[in-house]
Image (spheres, coloured by chain):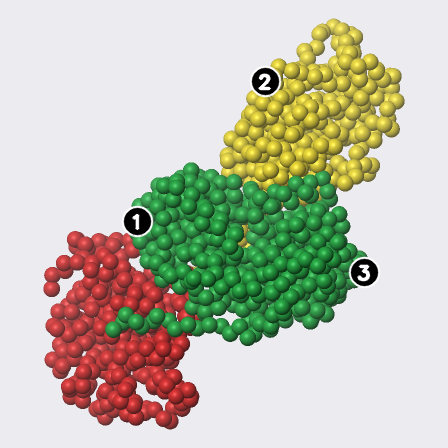
Amino acid sequence: MADDIFTYAPAPESRSVVRLRSSYGLFIDGAFADPAEGRSLKTVNPADEEVLAEVAVAGEADVDRAVAAARRAYETVWGPMPGAERAKYLFRIARILQERSRELAVLESLDNGKPIKETRDVDLPLVAAHFFYYAGWADKLGHAGLGADPRPLGVAAQVIPWNFPLLMLAWKIAPALATGNTVVLKPAETTPLSALVFAEICQEAELPPGVVNIVTGAGETGRALVAHGGVDKVAFTGSTEVGKEIARTVAGTRKRVTLELGGKGANIVYDDAALDQAVEGIVTGIFFNQGHVCCAGSRLLVQESVAEDVLERLKRRISTLRMGDPLDKNTDIGAINSAAQLDKIRELSGIGDDEGAQRWTAPCELPSRGYWFPPTVFTGVTQAHRIAREEIFGPVLSVLTFRTPAEAVEKANNTPFGLSAGVWTEKGSRMLWTANRLRAGVIWSNTFNKFDPTSPFGGYKESGYGREGGRHGLEGYIRG
Amino acid sequence: MAETPESSERSEQAGKTVARRPGGRAARTKRADEGAPPQVEPARPAEPPAVAAQGRLAVRKTYKLYVGGAFPRSESGRSYPVTDPQGGLLANAALASRKDARDAVVAARRAFGGWSGRTAYNRGQVLYRVAEMLEGRLGQFADEVAAADAVPRERAEALVAAAIDRWVWYAGWTDKIASVAGGANPVAGPYFNLSTPEPTGVVAVFAPPEAPLLGLVSVLAPVIATGNTAVVVASERAPLPAVTLAEVLATSDLPGGVVNLLTGRLAELAPPLAAHADVNALDLTGAGALAAELEEAAAGTLKRVLRPAEGRTDWTAEPGTERLTAFLETKTVWHPIGV
Amino acid sequence: MPDTISPPGLTASNASLRAYLHGLPGVDEVGAAQRAAGLATRSIKTTAKAQAIDLAIRMVDLTTLEGADTPGKVRALAAKAVHPDPADPSVPRVAAVCVYSDRVAIAVEALRGSGVAVASVATAFPAGRAPLEAKLADTRQAVADGAAEIDMVIDRGAFLSGDYLKVYEEITAVKEACGDAHLKVILETGELVTYDNVRRASWLAMHAGADFIKTSTGKVSPAATLPVVLVMLEAVRDFRAATGRRIGVKPAGGIRTTKDAVRNLVLVNEVAGADWLDPAYFRIGASSLLNDLLMQRTKLATGVYGGPDYYTLD
């Protein structure tokens, strides 16, 4: 009787709110322009491999033009503009983002593969909130504790990843503009579309030309931008490998740098935890955004005395995750962003098998087209396994156990990364004891993967340096 | 205030300086000799007759490294002559090797947990104790600074006094910086959210070549005030006040390993420290021409890097909090608020 | 009835019972609320919605619990229970009619042969502040008059003062008085306040012999909130894993719209599992909900929005 109930009928969000152009140019000096060399790349919907649009590839000459436009805007308009006026532009942008949020949510799901539930309820609200938050700072910078007369740096080169395309754009552009800098931003090559719509929003807001420039392209474009001599600041979110390359590139220059890089977050579950919420936190920690999250809780450290119980609950819970069409409002797990990323996840998971860890996969059918990887849990993992050390950046959880709080902390910290960690315990003093000892920039206790524009975010060690969000987020864009 | 007062003072007052071996009473008794022509021959004992004149042979100090709370010689067995600006020999200092640098990092790492785990109040007490001990040795430091930079004794005393005051200034910061650099964040949800600064770990400090005491104190004190531990490469040219500072640290309540001091060649010591995977940050203030290369090496493990200042630094000016925050990590802790 | 499923010594003393209940995993309020809110965003459309509406109708305990309940009111409710929409015979009947104990006889008479059960609140509903003997007499009377289901209230005062054994013993006594009637134990979660208490009270009631655990009397707000239902569904799920016994859940109070009902069904489906999507294991205590379910049912079938004048009041 109950068998066929709640095979939830499809509940797709309408695509009609999105008006995609077949091709996009570069956004330089307030207008869309063709690239000098006329090269382009195709961006596809990872859920069905359909081509969404062609996007220009910016070469060195284009980057040069963009930086020059940003410099001009900085010197003639944006730098001299009173903070209160800058603020109003940012408020205006924030409002337009709210007004066009459904369109942008759908677009982001199309281009990225993440579920509409997340773009609609997480990405877009946070994007607008970031602009609102930093808008308010623009005329209050003297009160930020960053010197009596804080000044902008100049032109900021910003390179962002594909996992939260528009949110990462907001994290970069909002504080840069609030502090009086101008920007040249390069979105990821697999997810350029929401940044290009953001360019339209800048036009709609009548933002002075050159204040925001968007150059699309791949790694080569990013390198040209970072290395450009006219840039005063580099802000990057992405892999630790590229972060190191950038740190080398800017060595010996006066360019200021903030880097938000990879992670291998430990999610520590003590035996006195609120187990059902801990299980939710584990699921959110690793399966939110298909695990394409630098601060994912990809290493579950569970106290041995409750490990069996937790794993049983976890597997039962994972089995209820709904994987499929990113635009279906009931989808929990969407598509892997690209074929390359899928290959990487498969490769590292294969290494997990080879190293003797036990793989468990949620029973779910994978769509025949597109890039998909089912929620996966490896048990019997030790610190020595590569899947416990390397960032997989996919829906793959490695489970380790511990016996004592000290062992938990020791294992959690035993990594070159230091971005995030989770702590689950009903005992306040143990939570604080653990949080104090974890070498990570964000500690979620009895929760996971929470973000807020007022809350600084960033890593220790090889997870990068500098903070984004909050008052701390201004620091990377200000000369005291 | 003039930039780089110690060095500029030195040039202004060159005619009035004396080069002398520091560290003994004998040197102080020679103040009347100010104005004597500078001695320029290299590596020659500066003033043996002065000692003889007192009728007693002074006991000279051996300038050693300071690692893990002990004063070893370099494992390499090497030393190098330290001279005054005119080339007069002041003393032989240990010429530290890469292995000494490695040992210093081990000692600093070992000390990090305990030092960063102290209460901020306690760190302030310990640092203030250091200032008390410095004050007691003001004369000795003044002699060494005067000798090292060939500045008049009065000027040297003023610089030492400034260094002591600088130390006191940072001692007072230990339990305040968290309030200034951290705080509660009003997130839009039922969460307590607090950002707290934490020390970054082991910091390799390349002390400025000029200002051998005030400059050194100005770069070292902020690093350890916040709970970091340090491996300091002293001014290659003028390392003697640094070694004496180490002696002060050893006889204060500062745990061994919190500060580790190396003397020797910057070009030999800095690259391995900059590349060392167990070093968390670099202060390149005194790195000079090596700065870019060291920053590049630091990228290998994404060390935090404080670049050298543009232009020359006025070490007597109030420093602000930049040197404190440069070696802090911001940790943000979330917790739900519910019943 | 001998307790064969509880841990040995569970009720040896109040201390042992307390140790057991306080040894259950805690519930983080914010996390539970978030999980419930997350499930509330499930979009149930078309065929799934049609199924959900009919299932919800079959799960309704159509309730009237007023001082002003007359025989006429009870008979009208009974008629509605059997034929929720007189104009549409395809609408299923509800699970039960729920009345005060002194109205059981009237309801039994009105529902004889209909397949709709009669449930009676008992034990000095809603406060439960009466001597045990009075509560038992109340229960026996309702059963004697033909109630197939008894909805008792726990002694919240005893629970909040830490006298768990008193609460336990009262439930076992009422259970005994029920005979063959099914026992639903009302926790009155709005007075227990914390989800930790809701979880402990759930386990206490289940060990004491409850066939159902029920959120609320409907007289106290908040009543059947989604997080409370979530916590109780987790309790029955875990209780079955621990003991093999499947206990039912009944949210009551505050569920007025089809959307509320569907959200509850989504919770059941994803937390306890599809096994519980059955009127034998999940009920919804409500009075005004039924008409909204009927209106949505018609809307789904015809594509036209309805109005309250087209549905009977009782």
In space, the residues marked 1 and 3 are separated at their CA atoms by 64 Å
- Quadrant containing the N terminus of chain A is bottom left
Q: Chain of mark 1?
A: A
Left or right? Give the position of A117 relative to C158.
right
Circle 1: residue type: Glu
Q: Which residue is mark 3?
A: A76
Q: Amino acid at mark 3?
A: Thr
Q: Is residue B51 visible?
A: yes
Disc 2 crowd rating (10 Å Cα; few below 14, some 14-19, many 20+) is some
Judged from the image, the secondary structure of the residue bearing numbered disc 3 is: helix
User: Which subunit holds the residue at mark 3?
Assistant: A
Q: Which residue bears the numbered disc 2?
A: B75
Give the letter of the green chain.
A
Q: Amino acid at mark 2?
A: Glu
Residue A326 point in image, percent of width and height: 48, 65
Q: Give B265 or A36, whichever is nearer the viewer.
A: A36
Q: Where on the picture, by quarter, is residue C202?
A: bottom left
